Image (cartoon, rainbow, N blue to C red):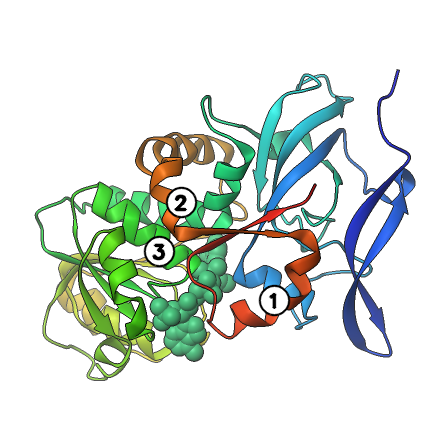
Amino acid sequence: MSTLPATFRALRAQQADQSTHAEFQTLPLSALPAGDVVVAVSHSSLNYKDGLAVLGRPGVLKAHPMTPGIDLAGTVLEDRSGRWAPGAPVLLTGWGIGERQDGGYAELARVHPDWLVALPPGTTPHWAMSVGTAGFTAMLAVLALEAAGLKSGQGEVLVTGAAGGVGSTAVALLAAAGHEVVASTGRPEEAAYLHDLGAARVIGREEVSGLTRPLEKERWAGVVDTVGGATLAGAYASTRTHGSVAVCGLAGGHDLRTTVFPLILRGVNLLGVDSVTCPAERREAAWARLTRDLPAARLAPITQTRGLSEVPTLAPEILAGRVRGRTVIDVR
Ligand code: NDP
């Protein structure tokens, strides 16, 4: 016997007259997309991409109407595939939810069983969403740097866009792994926050984006870049011989004007990070490490919790780079 509610509340992005706007709607169960698992969503989160989707910026939402929200956590209500027991606590990041298929800004979601990750024992949906895609991406970046040979004691590791969601969690994760973290930010007023997260030094954006020569003085043993553009070009040109750059984001631009010299004269590794399509096995490993290195107490100073009704007003804030750290969205 089904215990599913007849209707649910969702934030829907609608297209009219070639512009997109988001509004709250109460929808029938039949509005859910195809899929085997119905999840009662208790929490979602706010990522840069969600800001783009809610404000109707081109490129994120592949169809309309659509429920944005690239992350969700909650409880399984039913699973027709039999893989997940009703009541199982689960989380989901990426796989195209909130882009190609309805996402986490709704009380109910219907998804593919393979996309779900069991909530790690001892954690809560709120914790999972304070990590969210941003923290998960930071973890993938750190794992990529380590797989390419980065070890603590090798020297400074740079994080760009450090006061943002991916940046803040990358600073905390790198500090937890014993690295000497240098945080680059355009918000000098966030220096104390970044030191508290474990940054050894805080530098201005221009100290990285101003590095414009093909080969700059060697400085970074590793880099987690969330900014792209001139910042990524500067970080890459100043990475030490056999160091690595994990490329995560484009908050400052999607272009990359540079040369091959760091690759062929210093053996620098440019590593791509894509959290959306990350295979299940790597997801499990990343969430296990996040459980260890970013416990709730460590994430609390990074995290604010806001209601689903506040998402439309938060969206322009994250795109303007005014949101610090992570934002959990309470969907209940
Ligand atoms: P946030 O908005 O929380 O953080 C982005 C940070 O970048 C800001 O806080 C700011 O940091 C900096 N920034 C913003 N605008 C500019 C600018 N014009 N020039 C230089 N720096 C700027 O976003 P998220 O942390 O959620 O995401 C960061 C990036 O990573 C985004 O581009 C996002 O799309 C991408 N991303 C990629 C993923 C992947 O799978 N590859 C997954 C998740 C995110 P500060 O104030 O410290 O300077």
Q: Earlier in the sequence, mark 3 or mark 2?
A: 3
Q: Earlier in the sequence, mark 1 or mark 3?
A: 3
Find residue 168 and name its label.
3
> Residue 77 occupies which quadrant of the picture?
top right
Nearer the observer: mark 3 or 2; the answer is 2
Nearer the observer: mark 1 or 2; the answer is 2
Q: Which residue is mark 2?
A: 300
Amino acid type shown at disc 2: Ala
Residue 328 appears in the picture as rendered: yes
Q: Residue at x 55, y 70 (%)?
A: 317
What is the C-alpha distance between the residues marked 3 and 2? Answer: 12 Å
Given residues 134 and 315, the one toward you in this image is 315
What is the C-alpha distance between the residues marked 1 and 2? Answer: 21 Å
Find residue 315 and name its label.
1
> With respect to residue 281, does 308 lie above or below?
below
Q: Is mark 2 within 8 Å of ligand 1?
A: no
Helix, strand or loop at label 3? It is helix
Residue 71 appears in the picture as rendered: no
> Do the residues under discs 1 and 2 have CB atoms within 8 angstroms?
no
Helix, strand or loop at label 2? It is helix
Amino acid type shown at disc 1: Ala
> With respect to residue 295, does 152 lie above or below?
below
Q: How many labels sit on residues?
A: 3
